[in-house]
Image (cartoon, helix red, strand yellow):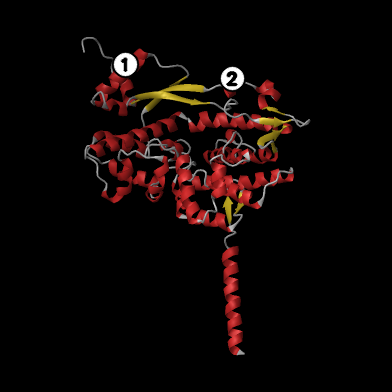
Amino acid sequence: MLLTLRLKLIFVCKSSAKHMSQTNKLKIFNDPIYGFITIPDSIIFDLIEHPYFQRLRRISQMGLSNLVYPGAHHTRFHHALGCMHLMQKAINVLRTKGISINHKEEQALYIAILLHDIGHGPFSHALEGFFTPGISHEDWSLAYMKKLNKEFDGKLDLAIQIFTKTHPRNFFHQLISGQLDMDRLDYLKRDSFYTGVVEGSINSDRLIAMLNVVDDDLVIDKKGIYSIEKFLLSRRFMYWQVYLHKTGLLAEKILLKLLNRARELLKKGQLTLPQQANLIDFLKDKTYQKEDLDKYVEAYTQLDDHDVWTAIKTWQDHPDKILSELSQMILNRKLLRIEMSDKAFDTEYVAKIKQKTLDFKQVSEEEVSYFFFQGTAKNRAYNKEQEAIKVLLKNGQVTEWTNIDEQFTSVALLQTQKKYYLCYPKRILNMPERTNAD
């Protein structure tokens, strides 16, 4: 009798523990943008808990934009959770409009959007393709998904199909990567919040409420056309005011110059960081193939913003003056001067600035490019040729957005806007002009 009672008690305790371990996976995150974000099921919880995903806590969302907007310290981890939350809302909206999405498809959409940016490297877009030339963060994201799929016994199959646009239901991929995807809806709202640039904020709830599906294409109900206007204007504003802000752009270009100098010194055997062997390995000139990325996933997972910051702090005292000075620029925010123009700079003016830089820095023709460089920044708010925003009319017909909202069609939104930039040391402005006698 007593033995039976003890066995029953053990069984109850084990059952309770098992039940608790399952329910504990349905946790919530308190997000400053959306409030409480719920984890929909245990697989999502396990993916979030995985070291591959936890690495996103150490990858900045906006590169070095915090040198301009001090609040912009949020990470890819925040963004991924926010995207998943918006996907939950989108699925609920579409179901209320009669769009069939079964449980497996729902779970796959959550997984695909949660992991869509898992392949970002240090400083996100600022160093896109630097450590692994020719390989995009989307390539890495797919490599991570495939690796996780093996670990999760094929439970990511459907998510991978959606991510790679091989699933027959086209609107699934559009929710992940499209004109009005959950990625854009979150990063505009989130980046606007953390930078304090309120003009860039969007009403993601309104846009999601207007979503619909016709012939497996994502569309917007006609009454949402003004929300599209606001969305595109906000996107354009955020690009020129935040993402391509001249100081942020300059800082990220200097960061690239700094790492290129480190790579050059490494080739010459003049750079050692024994405590950061993994970073050094990614600084080496290597050729990476998309189909072989699984070999490097573990090492890539150990590469994040902190490795780069630690190296920069070490390099500020490096005997190479170029590496040292560039490191100090980033650490102390003592940057070069940057000029931006709507037109290309006059060639004579550029030549004069280059010569002044050569005289001031006392470097070779090859090395002057670390302190004097130029380029272009461009953005297009809406490209209907690439993928149009489609509007569902009350009569059931579907048409492209600008056909309905013709009065809002403007050059600023529909054409690529380009700006030219020129960077050089600030102190050369005080240098006297060279004469022929010189």
Identity of the residue drawn at 62% across and 51% down = 104
Q: Secondary structure at mark 2?
A: helix
In the image, residue 306 lies at what x, y percent? Answer: 38, 47
Give the residue pinned by disc 1: 352
In the image, residue 361 lies at what x, y percent? Answer: 26, 26
In the image, residue 143 lies at what x, y percent? Answer: 45, 46
Quadrant of image for the C terminus:
top left
Above or below residue 153? Residue 378 is: above
Q: Secondary structure at mark 1?
A: helix
Q: List the single residue furthest toward the bottom.
A: 1
**168 sits left or right of 64 in the view:** right
Amino acid found under the numbered disc labelled 1: Lys
Q: How many numbered discs, if any?
A: 2
Give the residue pinned by disc 2: 411
Above or below residue 337? Residue 62 is: below
Identity of the residue drawn at 60% across and 68% down = 19
Give residue 43's quadrant in the image. Answer: bottom right
**426 sits left or right of 50 in the view:** left
Give residue 94's quadrant in the image. Answer: top right
Identity of the residue drawn at 21% across and 10% down = 437
Q: Earlier in the sequence, mark 2 or mark 1?
A: 1
Which is closer to the viewer, label 2 or label 1?
Answer: 2
Amino acid found under the numbered disc labelled 2: Val
Please indicate, yes or no, whether residue 294 appears anywhere in the rendered image.
Answer: yes
**64 sits left or right of 322 in the view:** right
Please indicate, yes or no, whether residue 75 appears anywhere in the rendered image.
Answer: no
In the image, residue 360 lies at what x, y percent? Answer: 26, 24
